[in-house]
Image (cartoon, rainbow, N blue to C red):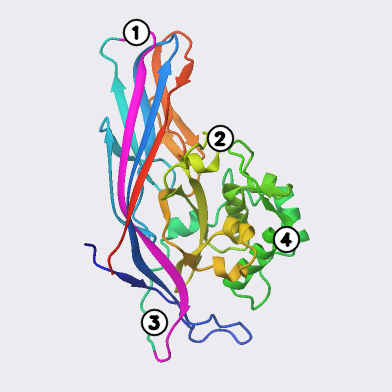
Amino acid sequence: MSRNVCLVLCILVVQGASPGVAQPPLLKIEATDHETVSATITYETRARNCIVSRWTTFLPEPPELPSQTCVKTTSTPTGKVVAEKSPLARNVRMIDLQIAKPAPGAEFKVRLEIRATLRSRELVPLAKGESPPTVTSLAPTEKKYYLAPSNLVDFDAKPFRDWLDAKKLRLQKNEQPLTLAARVLEELRDDFKYRYDELEDKRASAVCTRAGTDCGGMTNLFVAVMRANEIPARALIGRLALPRKPGAMPTDLEFDRPHARAEMYVEGVGWVPVDPSYAVATKENPVTAFIGHDPGDLLVLHVDFDLRLPFPDKERTADLLQLGPYYWVAGRGAFESVPGPNGWEVTTAPVVK
């Protein structure tokens, strides 16, 4: 039995603020252990003709976050946990195998097992007379990273800047970040339809020119708007804690259950969850229902995009490690891979309150 734990965060009224500057509302995040999840991901691939002497593969190493705790990950082969080379130095799992007897048709199989407690989160007002607890500010390195453009969150690109101005999504005088977040979701709801396409260009500068995209595209767009307005924001990349739908095909959303959500950092509150695609898909609820609400059903594999992976020959960038691993091989002959079956199995259990 897991003990029910609440994490309470809040937003502080700033003492001595300049006249005319809107004061933030007194809010806090309440997080509660929701369910335990046990997930198994398997990958298989085979070299058709190349005589492989070495496989090097990178897999996600799910982190501890406000939305998930008690994370334990194991793999077969075991591999080791290393830090990728971006300023965030996120942990990834590297498996480096030397093949004892290289031969054509070598197979590579890997199994990743993840256990975690997922947490639901709600943004709620402080009770009357309630003292706000202390919230740790972002480290300078984190803040700089979560305010900067990236390959997918390219808010410095002209098509995105033109779109931002056309939609009037600049932070207004005295406007709170949470109010801007609601305006962004309203624009997405008005202009976009949900459309899953694993292979589409999900750069914010490309997404803003279309009328439909998936959770990844909408998350990139939301994060780009926040960062363009100097509000730290990031993406949570993972899979919903749901098994495959019977009969689903590899190109279906229900096959590997990929999902992406956003978080925006509000000083004094911490990371506030935002789900842009749910706001677009569920129009019977106001957009504010998707700000500061996390049902605790997403197993986060890693935070944000653009992981810089230290392969044996050189560093390479991976947009994400959500549906498949990144690998490198050494050997003789032209390499052509034949993907094998990939597995996704998950079981959950509610946390007993």
Q: Amino acid at mark 1?
A: Ala
The CA span between labels 2 and 3 is 46 Å
Quarter location, residue 308 = top left
Q: Amino acid at mark 3?
A: Pro
Mark 4, residue position: 190
Q: Secondary structure at mark 2?
A: loop
Q: Nearer the viewer, mark 1 or mark 4?
A: 4
User: Where residue 6 appears, x then y in whole percent?
Assistant: 32, 71
User: Where residue 189 appears, x then y in whole percent?
Assistant: 68, 60
Q: Are marks 4 and 2 in contact (CB under 8 Å)?
A: no
**Quarter containing the C terminus:** bottom left
> The magenta stretch spans which residues?
102-129
Residue 160 vertical placement versus 170 (above, below)? above
Q: Would residue 159 appear left or right of 284 to someone viewing this image?
A: right
Residue for point 58% across, 43% down: 151
Mark 2, residue position: 251
Residue 67 in the magenta stretch? The answer is no
The CA span between labels 1 and 3 is 64 Å
Mark 3, residue position: 132
